[in-house]
Image: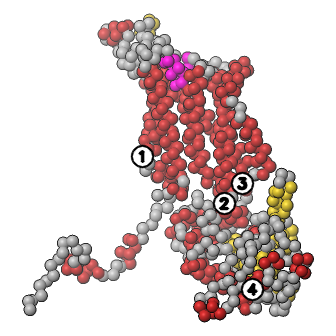
Amino acid sequence: MSETLVDVRNLKQYFPVKVGIARTIPLKAVDDISFTIGRGETLGLVGESGCGKTTAGRSILRLYKPTGGEVYFNGELVTDKNITHMRKKMQMVFQDPYSSLDPRMTVEDIIGEPLDVHKLCSNRKERHERILELMETVGLNAEHATRYAHEFSGGQRQRIGIARALAVKPDFIVCDEPVSALDVSIQAQIINMFEELQDKLGVAYLFIAHDLLVVHHISKRIAVMYLGKIVEIADADELNEHPIHPYTESLLSAVPIPDPDITRARQRIILEGDVPSPLKRPSGCPFRTRCRYATPQCAEECPDLSDRGGNHLVACWVK
Amino acid sequence: MEEQKPLKKNPLSMQLDLSKFSEETFKAATDEEKRQQDVMGESTTFFKDGMRKLFKNPLAVMSIVVIVLILLIITFAPMIVPYKYEEILSVNGVRDKGAKNLAPFKYSQLEQEYIDNGGSRFPHLFGTDEQCRDYFIRVVYGTRISFFIGFFASIIVLIIGMLYGSISGYLGGKVDLVMMRIVDIIYSLPDMLMIILLSVVLNEVLKFSSGSLLAKLGTNMVSLFIVFGLLYWVGMARLIRGQILSIKENEYILAAKSIGTKPGRIIRKHILPNCLSVIIISTALQIPSAIFTESFLSFVGIGVKAPMPSLGSLANAAREGLQSYPYKLIFPAIVICLIVLSLNLLGDGLRDAFDPKLKR
């Protein structure tokens, strides 16, 4: 594995939720997750809606103040004090290209804002040139610079958002479901662009998505989240071929394969019931209420991630 | 078999008649010709773009024209008309007692004699009032006062409301809770009672040097401004707070934070421009509402101090002779209507023009 760039240790993000008049209980959106991302590497983060993927991404960038845990970037602890400086190294691409661009600003101003905030350009000419360069990098025409965001299609808007993230020359970008709001043909373009940018600029991604195929395509390693916890991390191919955790198994069995023979032959693992509310987490393993293999031990103690060989970490008592 | 006839062309046919086109027509376009097709939208600033759209809106243009006309009249009419608003008409130094309640463009007996003897006299465009004063100049001054009050009151309201609302909305949480309860308390105070009480108190407290504008307006008007500053901003503050609360949740604010933008810049560059349309329209609507309040107060007799006229006090004075001299009510009433209507329409037009989502 290459040199570690981002090291997330025991990150916790709880939100207080009002119950009754004066009582609050914590909503454990992200509960004690740890992982590392190497320089120029992509870690995919998958899980169903509401499992805390987005919150995890935002907590790493300190858009929310984490309840506990640390994030080290390039060996340096990220704190409130050095966060302004860190924002030059860590950026984010947002899920919804329609709401993540200010409707009052032209494309030039949107992409130029990080340059202004961090005072990266000494004069207007330099700023303009840098913006045009960024626009070319993400495949936008120079004549689009004076237009407003609402004049563009979803894919183009997402390109603007990517150009904004690239403006400060970051080493690490959190991609928060960057393609799930786009239609499939555009998804492919944007994902290929992410890959090209990685080859060219050497950025590392935390690629959050709920589409396993997309994540498998772009990621070197994949982490699977369930109810605020990481249940399995492995290399992309390893996870795809030998899933260990029962949740990963069922996720993979739900991925559509464009071959009717295989689809008919394989067994689909259908999960029963819904995701429990994060306010009423089951005791022990969070997945035990829907797990086929659940044993009494699962209800008592929460399993930790353990190495099953070849960098394949799984949190399960049974398998 | 017969020789094949050339096909007869059906007059309704949409098929192209190729014989009409020469070989030249089907040549590929040169690069230069292709470039003519690249229509580039002219690059404009946000403000220019908005103004361009504003001037495309006929109602907005009409109301701008009306407002500008009224402003021109109230600026220049006092220079042209040789009468003063408090001047009782006289001819050659003799008080003209006959010039009471004259109809528009009529002269009194004394004035007629003066004109017959070769003198010239400026016509009374709107007639005269019961105290032998030229009514046109009184309406002009009344409009001046009403405009003055409308603009200043809404600026006071805008400044206080915007500061209070944006602080409350942006900070949120407990600060917002306390600040909004204060607003609720102020909202529940009866405004008319406050104006009356304040004008009584201020009458005692405030002594303006005679001749200053404030002294001419009277303490009632000063207390009206103070009441606007104390009470009327709450509507604006609530509105702006609500806007900011909803804009704050947008992802582009989070995006700005993730870039490293400081809160001050976020408010200035992202939040305020996005609630600008609401601010503009509510300010534009605040002006007629202030004019209404002033007219109402003058109408009930606690407005501007006599002899200074305002549109409301003129309408009030006209009540007494309504059956004999209805025009004395009609003139100030029409002016109030014109001002309020055109400011409302202009406010609407501004909102439409400066909202990029409504771009046509």
For residue B250, the mark is 2
**Image spot of residue B247 (x, y percent):** 66, 56
Residue that appears at 68% across and 83% down: A254
Vertical side of B193 occupied by A268: above or below? below
The answer to which of A171 and B93 lies nearer the viewer is A171
Which of the 4 image quadrants contains residue B298? top right
Chain identifier of the residue bearing label 1 in the image: B
**Host chain of mark 2:** B
First-in-chain label (2 vs 1): 1
Left or right position of A118 against A73:
left
- Badge 3 marks a residue whose secondary structure is helix
Principal secondary structure, stretch drawn in magenta: helix
Q: Which residue is mark 1?
A: B58
Q: Are marks 3 and 1 in contact (CB under 8 Å)?
A: no
Q: Which mark's residue is nearer the viewer, 2 or 4? A: 4
Q: Is residue B94 left or right of residue A85?
A: left
For label 1, the SS is helix
The amino acid type, in three-letter code, at marker 3 is Gly
The residue most toward the left is B2
| Residue bearing the label numbered 3 | B264
Q: Earlier in the sequence, mark 3 or mark 2?
A: 2
